[in-house]
Amino acid sequence: MVMKIIVGAISTNCYFLYDKETKAAMVIDPGDNADAILKVIRENGFEVGYILLTHGHFDHILAAQGVKEATGAKLVVHKDDAPRLLSSAVEDYQPYLSGGYKEPKPDILAKDGETISFGPLEVKYVSTPGHTEGSCVILSGDVMFSGDTLFYRECGRCDLPGGDYNEMLRSLKKLALLPGDYTVYPGHGVKSTLSDERLHNPYIRQAMAR
């Protein structure tokens, strides 16, 4: 099961992947507002085993340490984006740091294809550079948490440090070629499906034409 709340100054989607029976849960992209995230955890009785980051931009990580301290969950980020969690890496975003920033220490530096299990939950990290060097999509069953790689009929920005449009197109092609279909839960905006994006997303169409 998936639950979403919107957090932070840039309306980031923070997701809860959970098992209805056992209440085992993982938090994806705790971008800000740790109190709001922890309230959802308490109200639903979730036992959070992992905090999963799709990438290391400030608007996806600001509440990571607060949630980690409160739950004891392990923090996972792709190895290439771990440097983005350092306090020095978020200094340029001071206007968005009204609540301050507690630098989190990752417990797992994920690699492409890495799987993580907690109770009945299992996720797989898929490396999708382009938005950042360590951007990833996280798969669980027929669900895809696409971070800032894939949006509804859009893709993530490539003009920020670490961005690369050619890498983005390669990553989008990699996703389009995955077998089957997925419900796509992006880092911002509304959900979609991979089958719809294959047909209608102009960036995927461009990637597939290469």
Image (cartoon, rainbow, N blue to C red):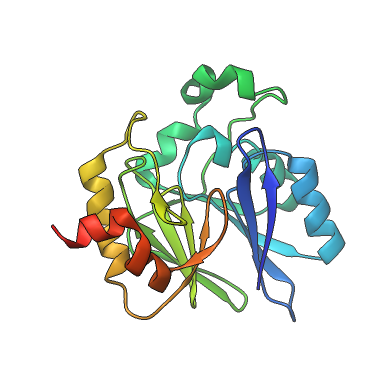
Q: Is residue 104 shown left or right of residue 47? A: left
> At which x and y percent is residue 17?
63, 66
Q: Is residue 208 shown left or right of residue 46? A: left
When the figure is inspected, residue 71 is found, relative to residue 89, above or below; the finding is below
Q: Looking at the image, which residue sits at the far right?
A: 43
Q: Looking at the image, which residue sits at the far left?
A: 210
When the figure is inspected, residue 30 is found, relative to residue 93, above or below; the finding is below
Q: Is residue 64 shown left or right of residue 164? A: right
Residue at the spot 48% in from the left edge and 36% down from the top edge: 57
> At which x and y percent is residue 36?
79, 46
> At which x and y percent is residue 138?
46, 62
Out of 81 and 74, give the one closest to the viewer.
Answer: 81
Out of 21 and 32, give the one closest to the viewer.
Answer: 32
Residue 164 found in image quarter:
top left
Quarter of the image with the C terminus in it: bottom left
Q: How many marks?
A: 0
Residue 159 found in image quarter:
top left
Quarter of the image with the N terminus in it: bottom right
> At which x and y percent is residue 202?
31, 55
Residue at the spot 55% in from the left edge and 62% down from the top edge: 191
When the figure is inspected, residue 5 is found, relative to residue 62, above or below; the finding is below
Residue 105 found in image quarter:
top right
Residue at the spot 74% in from the left edge and 41% down from the top edge: 34
